[in-house]
Amino acid sequence: MAIRSRVRWLSLAACATMALVVLAGLAGCKKKTPAPAPSDTTADAPSAASGREQAGLDPLDAAANLFREPSVSIQNVVKAAKTWSPAAEQWWGKIAQDFTLTDINGNVHTLSDYRGRNVLVVIWTTWVATCRLEIPHLKELRAAYADKDLAVLSISNEPPALLKEYAQKENLGFTVLSGGGSSLPAPFGEVQFVPSTFFIDPQGRFKVAATGLVPAEDAKAIVQAQ
């Protein structure tokens, strides 16, 4: 019995040794495939970080820019106009000549006193239908901006008492000046049709002049245009 046990043990040991040899051989035959080297894409596409550096924007600023309205050009606003026409184009970009008028409450207003803010000068009358139709748009524009950012000056050569009564009745909410006409400097004194509207920038230069009804949205776009 002892001899048989010994023979059986030797046989098992031999089998185990052969199995190890076979496994070792298989492991030696299997070649390792090297991992592909990462491709260099820096020449084709900049990284997100480098893109931010080139743009010079903080990530929060870049995100905010996505929700900002694109800048509108004056040329595009003029081209899209439907109820008004450009006027006095030779004055665009030039400094507006100064004038002084009195409002319906007896206060004196000088155009140059409004430097530093946008100014809308509207020449109108109470009896022209288009002028009356424009009033809601002027009221909307007046409500859309603070006084420090925009002044709305309406000018009519009708009697102050008539203008004051009309302003109170319609609750105008913007400055109503009495006088003007041909006594005003050009181009204000050269107006042939009403309403005529002049947009003046904070530096005192004409941005746009228009004849006809200027809708509030068009007026806002002109005020904001660069």
Image (cartoon, rainbow, N blue to C red):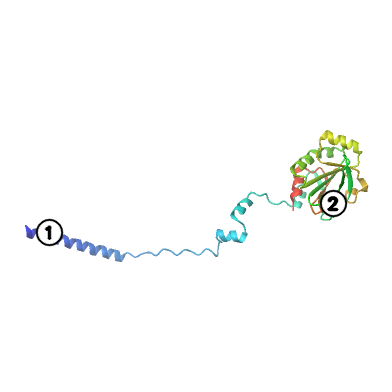
Q: Of marks 1 and 2, which one's residue comes earlier in the chain? A: 1
Q: Classify 11 as above or below 186.
A: below
Give whichever of 38, 155 is nearer the camera: 155
Task: Tell me if 12 is positioned left or right of 170 in this view.
Answer: left
Secondary structure state at the residue bearing disc 1: helix
Residue 191 can be seen in this image: no
Q: Which residue is mark 2?
A: 112
Residue 180 image position (x, y, % from top left): 91, 45
Q: Please tell me how many numbered marks the rendered image carries.
A: 2
Q: Which residue is mark 1?
A: 8
Residue ID at (58%, 59%):
51
Q: Residue furthest top?
A: 169
Residue ID at (26%, 64%):
24
Disc 1 crowd rating (10 Å Cα; few below 14, some 14-19, many 20+) is: few
* Residue 91 figure quarter: bottom right
Residue 222 image position (x, y, % from top left): 76, 49
Label 1 to label 2: alpha-carbon separation: 118 Å
Residue ID at (90%, 36%):
161
